[in-house]
Image (cartoon, helix red, strand yellow):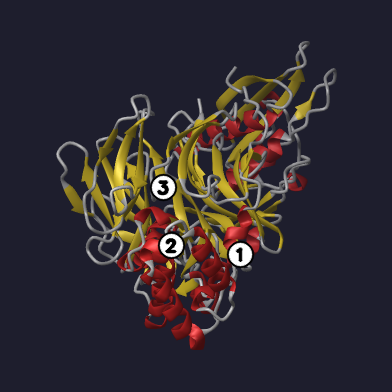
Amino acid sequence: MKTLLRNLGLLLIGLLLFQARAHAVLTIEITQGVEGALPLAVVPFSVAPGGAEPDTDISAVIGADLARSGRFRPLPPEDMLARPHDAAEVKYEDWRVLGMENLVVGRLEPNPDGSYEVRFQLLDVFRASQLLGYSITARPGELRRAAHYISDLIYEKLTGERGAFNTRIAYVTVQRPAKGETLFGLQVADSDGHNPQTILSSREPIMSPSWSPDGNRLAYVSFEGKRSAVYVQDVRTGQREQVTSSPGINGAPAWAPDGQRLALTLSKDGNPEIYVLYLYSKRLVRITNSLGIDTEPSWAPDGMSLVFTSDRGGTPQIYRAWLDGGRTQRLTFDGSYNASPDISRDGKRLAVVNGDGRSFHIAVQDLDSGVLQVVTDTPLDESPSFAPNGSMIIYATQSGGRGVLAATSVDGRVKQRLLLTEGEVREPTWSPFLQ
Amino acid sequence: MFLRIGKFVGTIVVGLSLLGLAGCQTTGGLGQGEEGAAVDEAGAMSGGADARGAAAGGRFSGAALDDPNSPLANRVFYFDFDSFMIKDEDRSIINAHGEFLAANPDAQVRLEGHADERGSREYNIALGERRANAVRQLLQLQGVAAGQIETVSYGEERPAGLGHDEQSWSLNRRVELIYTRR
């Protein structure tokens, strides 16, 4: 592993965004790679004359996406012996001598209406054959999305698993511009940290963003009224609605897979309990009933049960409650502290914050076998959130005394850090697949 | 087509105004020695229950709440890790606030519960609420009406100390008592 790290160097992908309001530039650093990553070459795409200069280097974005997954090792363009843009131009021997297994070639051709035709082919170097070939129309400003989409197609073809590059993350930022002054922000960015947009700013805390299953809305907690309330906001239009502001805690919203219900925590009846709120009828159904703390609900993908954190047994542990009849089962037994559960989209795994009261790591529990595996080793990790394809978990950690985001493969073998240029970033949540 | 990227319309800026002030409301840490006198005084006032005129209440509140040597000047209470037990040394101070509030039914306080950064954020919101509720219960034992007390938990979201060590954590496990009306 050490050697591999040295070989990889610290593959540093600086992602700069020149946008007036974006203080928050995220840089992704792959801190731990994996042996056996597939060697592949993404040849820089050619740009046919006749259109505006594209604002995105598509092949660089694809290469960075594939490297970030930990499953691929893209060849640096300066090491390439040739730069073909079409399968017909490829001399496979050029790539065999470099040990490449796969090759991506492509080109951009401007259309009369100002959009681009993006053509690419994924080639098998040893069989000298085409695995994929697509042509995609993208308007200016859509080229990064097109690149992520192509990364998804390549990833799925080569791994058999759906790609999650063309997805987004939401997270909370904290800036302290002056002593005693704190600015909270709710941001949405591409899954590689690019293109961050602030959708809410406040001088009071913002917490616990949760995506709607169609990726169009976020539920979150805001203290802007000097106490907690849960809001639902349309990500595109910015329109929003306050959905609960009961006395006490209004927290931990989690969108049901059907998009019509929110699970959340309210303490209006004395202590924190889990409720399900029907968004259209505003009907509120209480799910838990214990003297302890019940909070942080997360839905099973079938919408039939919720997992949540409860200290009803003395220490915080994860429990599962079925909505039809109230059966409740304890799920975690390893460690004196398990909290902040997130269920993978296939329902097979549970990500949690696992600790002993002193240090807190991200752990993954197999829900069939009950086996829990700790996958991070930094001391103050929190807020795990699965990628929609279940391959990675994004979470919050501390680095250099401030809050940063990090991601790990579910087996802990691949790690990366997402660094914000200033301030802190926390509570990441990965979007569902986008339509 | 599939690549359509929606525009974010504007940024919503909320919650300007004084706010931040609540977070930096002072720590008292004063006047343990003076507490007997002030408590007696508060007791005397509450004794004149039916005579709780605006003038009397006003005079007392002005004096006691602004007197740095009064126990009422102490408005931050600290807690042990994962605990919501009020410490013995804070009990008499909270009782003094309770007597003051009972004697001044127009006065109102806000109890802000906080936690240190360890563990999950929503769980810490719940811990902060437990701490605020512990102080509220003690105030109510002194006869303070429920309507005089508002509680809110900020969990780990508004730390008093920004470090990542026990020194900061011990400052952050706290309840701040803030007079919103005197």
Task: Please give the residue where the numbered disc 1 appears in the rendered image.
Answer: B24
Q: Which mark is residue B169?
A: none
Q: CA distance from mark 2 to mark 3?
A: 40 Å
Task: Please give the residue where the numbered disc 3 appears in the rendered image.
Answer: A251
Q: Is residue A156 above or below residue A247?
A: above
Q: Position of residue A105 (x, y in %)?
A: 67, 31
Q: Is residue A252 above or below residue A280?
A: below
Rendered residue at 25%/67% (across/down): A314
Q: CA distance from mark 2 to mark 1?
A: 32 Å
Kindly check if marks 2 and 3 are in contact, taking CB atoms under 8 A apart as contact. no
Q: Position of residue B110 (x, y in %)?
A: 47, 58
Q: In the picture provided, is A298 more to the left or to the right than A185?
A: left
Is residue A53 visible from the viewing direction of this image?
A: yes
Q: Is residue B52 above or below residue A349?
A: below
Query: Can you tell which of label 2 and label 1 is closer to the viewer?
Result: 2
Rendered residue at 41%/65% (across/down): B103
Query: Can you tell which of label 3 and label 1 is closer to the viewer?
Result: 1
> Could you tell me which secondary element the residue under label 2 belongs to?
loop
Amino acid, disc 2: Arg
Mark 2 or mark 1, earlier in chain: 1
Of A24 and B20, nearer the camera is: B20
Q: Position of residue B139 (x, y in %)?
A: 36, 66
Kindly check if marks 2 and 1 are in contact, taking CB atoms under 8 A apart as contact. no
Classify 10 Å Cα crowding around label 1: few (below 14), some (14-19), many (20 and above). Answer: some
Please determine if labels 2 and 1 lie on a single subunit. Answer: yes
> Could you tell me which secondary element the residue under label 3 belongs to?
strand
Kindly check if marks 3 and 1 are in contact, taking CB atoms under 8 A apart as contact. no
Of A249 and A153, nearer the camera is: A249
Q: Which mark is residue B52?
A: 2
